[in-house]
Image (cartoon, rainbow, N blue to C red):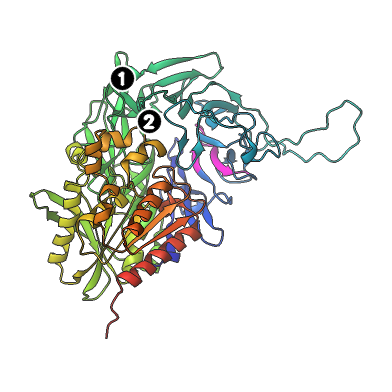
Amino acid sequence: MRAEDIEALIAVGRPTIARDGSFAVFAMSRPDIAANSNVGQLWRVDLPDGTPRRLTRGKADGSPRLSPDGARIAFTRLDAKGRPQLFVVDATGGEPVQATDAPLGVGDFDWSPDGTVLGFTARVPEKGRYGTVEGLDPNAESPRRITGVRWHANGLGYIADRPAHVFVVAAPQTDSEPFYEPAPAVIAEGDEPPKKRIVAHEATQLTHGDRSHSGIAFSGDEILTTVDEIERERRDLRSPLIAVRTDGSGERELIGRDANLGIGGVAVADDGTIAFLGDDVGPEGVDFVAPITSLWVLEADGPRRVTDAETVDLGEVGSHITPLGEDFLVQDRTRGRVRLLRVTRAGAVTEVLGGDVEVGGHDAAGDRIVAAAATPDSYGELFLIDGGAAPRVLTAFGARAAAAGIVAPTELSVDARDGYPVHGWVAKPEGEGPFPVILQIHGGPYASYGVHLFDETQVLVDAGYAVVYCNPRGSAGYGREHGRSIRQAMGTVDFTDVIDFLDGAVAADSALDGDRLGVMGGSYGGYLTAWVIAHDHRFAGAIVERGFLDPTSFQGTSDIGSFFGDEYVGTDPDAIARQSPLAVVDQVRTPTLVMHSELDFRCPLEQATRYYSALVRNGVDAELLVFPGENHELSRSGQPRHRIERFAAILDWWARRLPVKTPS
């Protein structure tokens, strides 16, 4: 596939299924280059054999949740100001009705058990900021007083002046009278002119103060949500779970900080059992390196871990829980896959959907389970598991990508120099080669490459490059010891693992030209790329993208700087220097393209500019490419035109530094 074929990367979001199992609803999304945004709508499929059909026609409709009776769907849609608001539409289709008018849009949401109320989170702006005063330019706002260790977040910006709170609003009826624009009229002196109405019911705010809240799960007449409070002196990843009364009469704590848990993905079973995804972050609240996310249930004497922390990891992005009778459905990441598991309350595990899939969402009713998953030849499809039958694909969104041309990678395991097995893949163009080889390194570090259709690899292969990529020690999906092996030892076995995997891949395939090599990576992959070129000088070029390049300045600039570096590289200055790419930049001789985004608050822009400046000062052939208006997620969810321009820059760099030989 080529860069412009990112429009074929059609993703399927978390599905929702009717209680009687008769139909399911899901959202699809994809990049649209002409619109320069990600677009998508809701789809419905009648089960078990219906044809999927488009249900809504908004620009970016998403996150559908069916009402308990299956008659209506609540979902998010951008309003006229580009803010995500809740809308409600009949499950059979029709004109959606707007349910919220939150000043900064809504976040998490869910239906009440009786279907009369929607609970949601929304950020509440401080008065005088974020457009709350008409005509007040952001540059003219009052200064911000920072008193905690955190003040911003990637993809959002400042956080202390817009905490997220819990709200409830009456769910609108889809057949109600619409609102009309008031016509100009002469009014009596002292009277107020009629206001234009957008929503039928005003939302009620249930929580207040400086603390933020995330997650919405109804439990009777309470809403379960987690609490995030900006710390005064040191980071604390422990997140209390509270229950907020829907009538606004108060709240109570269910799980406190003394449980030492980072909590997310709360769900309530039909019998009232509370389950959640949790990481044990230790009594200091910062032990986050390879935590192994587990399924927990809340019992009378406190939380109980259900899944085995050594063999099941539920920490993949988007992971959640679906209660299913006495059991729970969860997503387990392992060796580049994300499989769907059914887990009993006693901890017994059964695989529901496995193989070469990366499950991104699921729901269930009776004996029917629907799951959204990516595969090697599709960015997203909807699967049906009907009773004891084998899983069946209900959609064919991958056909567009297949028509664009994709290559199936070959799975490979290589023993590192110390005998440790390193798992990964090789993707190469058709033909005998030999092809120039690019070593790709993933971010994280506690993340992983997987089996899903990956545009980063496919575009390079289409351009004539063989691509080698693996999950070295420090990656997710291979157990806790694997993930923690580089804690305060970055640039050690992770470095040798990627190099040894590259060497093993080249030695195993004569189509790979070991004399023509490049290396590239983003985020932690940018870190390791910078580390590689300081210690191995055989590469014709390198691309260091959105990198973690100076642990010292990272501490005071990144949104995770208050704890990330402390845990991964330690606090001793000598230890930090031993693991810092900037400390060894004077050893780099490889031509290097440094790429970054202006609004990256995860690995701030200064990481790139200081590294680039050091390269130039040391006489290295280097270039810097900075994308305006983008954050750390440019390559995954940035503006489509910027994603195309990013690919163009990558291919141009390799064409100059590592050209593909034209067959004679």
Q: CA distance from mark 1 to mark 2?
A: 14 Å
What x and y, as percent, mark residue 235? 36, 27
Residue sitting at the far bottom: 664
At 34% from the left edge and 44% from the top edge, which residue is drawn? 386
Query: In front here: 263 or 420?
Result: 420
Residue at image location 24% in from the left, 45% down from the top: 475
Residue under label 1, please give it: 259
**Earlier sequence position, callout 1 versus callout 2:** 1
- Determine whether the residue tagged by mark 1 lies in a helix, strand or loop: helix
The stretch in magenta equals 63-79
Write down the quadrant of residue 426 in the picture. Answer: bottom left
- Give the numbered dot on residue 264: 2
From this view, report whether residue 344 is shown above or below residue 220.
below
Q: Amino acid at mark 2?
A: Gly
Q: Position of residue 645 (x, y in %)?
A: 46, 63
CA neighbours of label 2 inside 10 A, class few (<14), some (14 to 19), many (20+):
many
Residue 438 can be seen in this image: yes
Q: Position of residue 349 (x, y in %)?
A: 22, 35
Q: Is residue 661 above or below residue 243?
A: below
Q: Which mark is in front, 1 or 2?
A: 1
* Quadrant housing the N terminus: bottom left
- Label 1 neighbour load within 10 Å: few <14, some 14-19, many 20+: some
Total count of labels:
2
Relative depth, front residue between 311 and 576: 576
Residue at image position (50%, 33%) is: 159
**Would residue 455 be counted in the magenta stretch?**
no
Q: Where is residue 179, by image quadrant? A: top right
Q: Residue 244: image x %, image y %? A: 49, 19
In the image, what residue type sits under mark 1?
A: Ala
Q: Quadrant of the C terminus?
A: bottom left
